[in-house]
Amino acid sequence: MTDTTTDSPPRTAAAVTPAAGPRRVHAFRDDALGHDDATALAARIRSREVSPTELVEAAIERCAAVDPVLGALVHTDFDRARHRASWIETSQFSAPLSGVPSAFKDAVRVEGSPMRLGSSAVPANPALSDGPYAPLFRATGLNPVGTTAMPPFGWTAATERQGGLVTRNPWDTDRTSGGSSGGSAALVAAGALPIAHANDGGGSIRIPAAVTGLVGFKPSRGRHPDETFTAHMPIPIISQSVVTRSVRDTVAFLTAFEAGHRPVGVPPLGPVAPAPARRLRIGLVEQSPAGGPTDSATLSVLREAAERLAALGHEIVPSPAPVPPSFREDFVAYWGLLALSTSGTGRSLFDPDFDTDRLDPFTLGLAAMSRRGLPRLPLHLYRLFRTRRRFDSTFGDVDVYLNPVVGHETPEIGYLDADLPYETHLERVSNWVTFTPLQNIAGSPAVSLPTGHAPDGMPIGVHLSARIGHDSLLLELASEYEAAFPFARIWE
């Protein structure tokens, strides 16, 4: 379901599976976009095999085909996307991804578009100017057609908003597309767009990628700039990036982004080889002390990925989770602090018309928990800072960690409903999101790869992480894996 639109695209039919099984929805067809990823589309534009206008019109038609089912777009910007496509056609295609259709997540300021962060408490007022990130994203050449859905303020791992607004998974429309970048993931997985903006404060890129069969890379802290409203976080945890259908698209985006922005505190990405220069020691982590036991379907996919990496010559070393037992309690306390800040300062952070009466139960519950626990907050922050400082040393002689993305299979729509009682919501999300927040606190790079499926056909991802600044090593390993074991596609 769409919250706001500015113009209406033509309606076309989406491809669906028979009604007897899970309802799978996608928009792949023989049009200008075809089945290509963003890298291939950019090459076709440069060779003038296809025009940016043809691509943006195909993307608009595909969004029209699947979005009534998926509910992934909250704001459309089709006319400006058409204008940009026309302008690109008269240029020299200088940006690496010039003319490739994309979208922003509803978490960055884009001049002329509303930024609501998934919350009805934030009014739908168009931004008067871009934030720090939007112009750098467009400088890669990507052509955004609109804004994608997220849950309120990105606190949870399913893209469900108040009033029954939900974003569905194209692999099975009864399941969640994850969160908080679930709108972007749904459109890319369904083939409406080849690549889309996402960001990650606790797994919000990696979780949607894992449950929709995509690549989701969280860069090292400092590689991309944050929005101004995150500037006063005691521990910066937000990373900007994209969700894609191929590792090479992720590399292409990161490389293109660094052509216009120099990272702070970490080395430039530099050339990314198709495989690591040496064989790696990979620490295999099956269970997290931050949640319940990992389920059997997730363990099966994880172990198969480990066997495949071993077949490529890498050494797999069973390892304990590199996280203290107190981490879950500490991260939830920090989550609550951010919710308390959001509810108390929303008028100055987001909009003078911010309406606290329209905040969702989970935000209010997190804020109330934080208010009650303020005397213990210094201890939680101290332990998180210590985890952040010591994370790199937990690797020892291991180069990369391999673990699940989440603790169990993809839940159905409603499992993390925005109107759930706070206590129920917190217990459910905490038991599902058991692995990914660590890298946000540590600032290290991590990637979700769609390496397998549950018995019912739903995608299951695995999670690779490395020391801060070692983004290239992680991408090289991911590239090698994808080349040897290609990822399944929704149309197959």
Image (tube, helix red, strand yellow):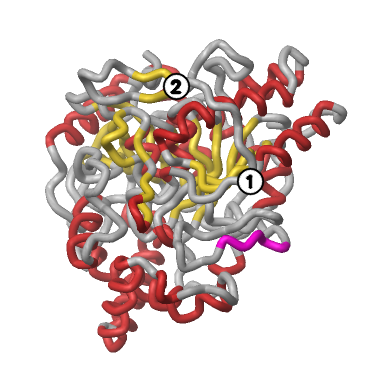
Q: Is 233 on the left-hand or right-hand side of 282?
A: right
Give the x, y percent position of residue 298: 20, 35
Snapshot quadrant of residue 379: bottom left
Snapshot quadrant of residue 308: top left
Q: Number of labelled discs?
A: 2
Helix, strand or loop status at disc 1: loop
Residue at x 55%, y 30% (from the top left corner): 193
Give the class, few, some or many, for how many residues have Cα within 10 Å of label 2's Cα (few <14, many ≥20): many
Q: Which residue is mark 1?
A: 6
Q: Calculate the distance from the C-alpha at mark 2 to the C-alpha at mark 1.
A: 22 Å
* Amino acid of disc 2: Ala
Give the x, y percent position of residue 332: 29, 68
Which quadrant: the N terminus?
top left
Q: Which residue is mark 2?
A: 14
* Amino acid of disc 1: Thr
From this view, report whether residue 322 is shown above or below residue 421. above
Give the extent of the magenta segment.
124-128
Give the class, few, some or many, for how many residues have Cα within 10 Å of label 1's Cα (few <14, many ≥20): few
